[in-house]
Image (cartoon, rainbow, N blue to C red):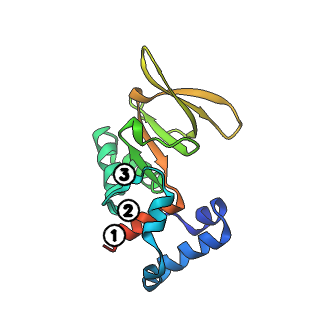
Amino acid sequence: MATSSSVASSYPTDFAEIFEKVKADPTLFSALDVNRLLEKIENEHYLENKSADDISKDIFDEIEELDLSEEVAMNYCMRLSDYRLVDKICDLRYGRWMRWIKKSDKTLTNGGLLMNVKLDAGGSVLLCKNNTNRFFNVRYDDCVIFQKLTMEEQFVLLANERR
């Protein structure tokens, strides 16, 4: 789950406060309208019946397949705690931060904002923009892709845990 500092810096104060209160006091969770949250998330099918533990396990299983040292694998899992594995290109969301591990050198990148998806003869190419507004391409098939979870998605995962 997200730390309070990362949540507070990324989202409006009132929403971040609600999130922190719900985490601290599960009885407040019943006051949330989960169906309304689901409606706000475009095509949330990739979260259907998934909990935060399921998302973490997906990441762990994928990283385990890369055959990294235990220390590096745990470090990657910790750094990807606010992300979800994207195993289908249709589950990518424009305008969201993503990180990836190149299959060739197995290093976790700092990532970039997904701007566009292009198809060419070599496969799918993701157009991204980094913090310095530099644009670059990432070959989808050459990487393991992770996309940052929004606050709404994290609420949905919390709701799924309590069902």
Residue under circle 1?
Answer: 161
Q: Position of residue 70 (x, y in %)?
A: 33, 48
Locate residue 5: give its quadrant: bottom right
Quickly name the residue at label 2. Answer: 52
Crowd tier of the residue under label 2, counting other residues whose Cα lies within 10 Å: few below 14, some 14–19, many 20 or above: many
Which of discs 1 and 3 lies nearer the camera? The answer is 3
Q: Amino acid at mark 3?
A: His
Give left or right: position of 126 versus 145.
right
Q: Position of residue 103 (x, y in %)?
A: 38, 30
Say which amino acid is labelled 2: Ala
Q: Secondary structure at mark 3?
A: helix
Q: Indicate left or right for 113 with 159 as reference.
A: right
Residue 12 figure quarter: bottom right
Q: CA distance from mark 2 to mark 1?
A: 7 Å
Residue type at mark 1: give it: Glu
Mark 1 element type: helix
Residue 21 shows in this picture:
yes
Discs 2, 1 touching: Cβ within 8 Å: yes
Quadrant in which the C terminus appears: bottom left
* Residue receiving disc 3: 45
Q: Residue at x 53, y 62 (%)?
A: 151
Q: Residue furthest top?
A: 121
Name the N-terminal-most of marks 2 and 3: 3
Q: Is residue 104 visible?
A: no
Q: Disc 2 to disc 3, how far (Cα)?
A: 15 Å
Name the mark nearer the viewer: 2 or 1.
Answer: 1
Question: Residue 114 is drawn in which quadrant?
Answer: top right
Task: Categorize mark 1 by other alpha carbons within 10 Å: few (<14), some (14-19), many (20+).
Answer: some
